[in-house]
């Protein structure tokens, strides 16, 4: 099981903490210096994809010089996102003629099969609310 705890802080903000002690401040879309919940969802998708793509590409002998992803989603209703788009920004190793194909193949496989966050967004995921 994977879990995080989200709670209101003494100053009225919100924070998410994992069991390893990492924290992320959470706020509304207009709050400065913090991520909104939707931005965290997009960050989770982009992070899941690139932390999976990077080692798989490197293991195949094609360490990318630069690897980043921009994740965008249009809000199609107040509580609904439309299509989420992941756009990669990649710099290939100089002189490596096979790196582009390897990267593209790996990125497609990761997106379709290996990114847990992406799969959860595409598939029906049950959520349960437990109240005191």
Image: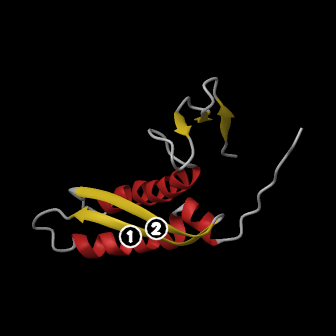
Name the residue carrying label 2: 110
Separation of marks 1 and 2 at Cα, in angstroms:
6 Å
Name the quarter where the C terminus is drawn: top right
Please report the residue visible at 24 percent of the width from the left and 59 percent of the height from the top.
Answer: 64
Could you say which quadrant of the image residue 19 lies in? Answer: top right
The residue carrying pointer 2 sits among few (fewer than 14), some (14 to 19) or many (20 or more) residues within 10 Å by Cα, namely: many
Residue 88: image quadrant is bottom left
On screen, residue 65 versus residue 72, left or right, reads left
- Toward the right, the furthest residue is 132
Dividing the picture into quarters, in which one does residue 118 lie?
Answer: bottom right
Tag shown at residue 46: none
Across and down, in percent, residue 9 comes to 63, 27
Q: Looking at the picture, does residue 83 appear above or below residue 2?
A: below
Is label 1 in a helix, a strand or a loop? helix
Residues 79 and 59: in front is 79
Q: Are marks 1 and 2 in contact (CB under 8 Å)?
A: yes
Q: How is the image coloured?
A: secondary structure
Badge 1: few (under 14), some or many (20 or more) residues near its Cα, within 10 Å?
A: some
Task: Please say if 3 is above or below 94.
Answer: above
- Where residue 112 appears, as percent x and y from the top left, is 51, 73
The number of numbered discs placed on residues in the rendered structure image is: 2
Q: Nearer the viewer, residue 119 or 98?
A: 119
Residue furthest toward the top? Answer: 10
Q: Which residue is located at x 52 percent, y 65 percent?
A: 114
Q: Residue at x 49, y 67 (%)?
A: 73
Task: Work out which residue is located at the far left of the displayed protein and give it.
Answer: 95
Q: Name above or below for residue 49 compared with residue 20.
A: below
From the image, tell me which residue sits under label 1: 106
Residue at figure coordinates x 67%, y 32% from the top left: 8
Residue nearer the viewer, 104 or 55: 104
Secondary structure at badge 2 equals helix
């Amino acid at each position: 099981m994977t879990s995080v705890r989200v709670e209101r802080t003494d100053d009225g903000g919100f924070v998410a903490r994992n069991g390893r002690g990492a924290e992320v401040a959470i706020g509304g879309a207009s709050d400065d210096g913090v991520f909104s919940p939707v931005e965290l969802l997009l960050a989770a998708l982009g992070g899941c994809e690139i932390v999976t793509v990077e080692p798989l590409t490197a293991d195949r002998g094609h360490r990318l010089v630069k690897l980043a992803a921009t994740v965008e989603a249009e809000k199609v209703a107040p509580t609904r996102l439309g299509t989420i788009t992941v756009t990669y920004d990649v710099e290939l190793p100089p002189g490596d003629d096979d790196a582009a194909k390897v990267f593209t193949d790996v990125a497609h496989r990761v997106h379709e099969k290996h990114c847990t966050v992406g799969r959860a967004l595409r598939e029906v995921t049950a959520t349960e609310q437990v109240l005191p």
